[in-house]
Image: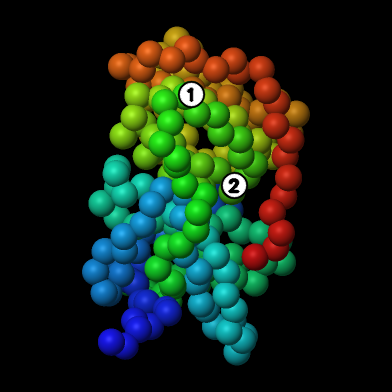
Amino acid sequence: MARPPLFQRATVTRIVRENADVRTFVLDPHEGPFPYRAGQFCSFRVQVDGKTLLRSYSMSSAPETDTELMTTVKRVPGGAVSNWLIDNLTEGDVVELTRPVGAFCLRPADRPLLGFSGGSGVTPILSLVKSTLATTDRHVRLLCADRDKASTFFDTALPGWPSATPAASRRSATSTTHAACSTPRPSGTSPPLPATATPTCADPSPS
């Protein structure tokens, strides 16, 4: 039996402007829905100035909560692919990508889940949080490091985010004071995690 091609084609059905430098691309694979797990990524193949370039981007959707496949891209200064995708892709365009892969996925557990992220690193974390809240009773706390308030995104991606309970809050994020979010499921029995940690902010490598 012949192997399926490494790269598949998908139509960009919607583009969501998350902020000035971030876009979420909603994709409709031509060969049918991609099976995937929260936390996985796809590698995209694009032509930029006559060169074939490959870049990997995480899913910001989760199979348990989203009927559409979504990946989120942040513009990086000097990044050939991130800038090309944000500046050139429009709804109806066709892109080439691999099926989702990767092992940054949830393991069975009942302990509270604590996530740390910086900038666009929140993308796979969001997918994991969605999956956790949809399928378990675990408490979740997410500490996000962003350059400033204008750089934050995904504020409305989860039900009840940013203030589902008295313990769930989101503070303005700056380079020195970072956001802390907690979204426990109402039926959870584990105590919430303390919101005292302050992650550092690191810029991703150009993509």
* Residue tagged 1: 112
Camera-near label (1 vs 2) is 1
Tell me whether circle 1 and circle 2 mark residues in contact (CB < 8 Å).
no
Front in this rendered view, residue 174 or 4: 4
Q: Is residue 81 left or right of residue 93?
A: right
* Residue tagged 2: 121
Label 2: element kind: helix
Mark 1 or mark 2: name the one nearer the start of the chain: 1
Label 1: element kind: loop
Front in this rendered view, residue 127 or 21: 127
Amino acid on which disc 2 is placed: Gly
Residue 18 seen from this side: no
Amino acid on which disc 1 is placed: Pro
Q: Position of residue 122 (x, y in %)?
A: 55, 43
Check the image and report above or below for 191 versus 81: above
Front in this rendered view, residue 29 or 15: 29
Check the image and report above or below for 8 versus 72: below
Distance of mark 1 from mark 2, alpha carbons?
A: 20 Å
- The quadrant in which the N terminus is found is bottom left
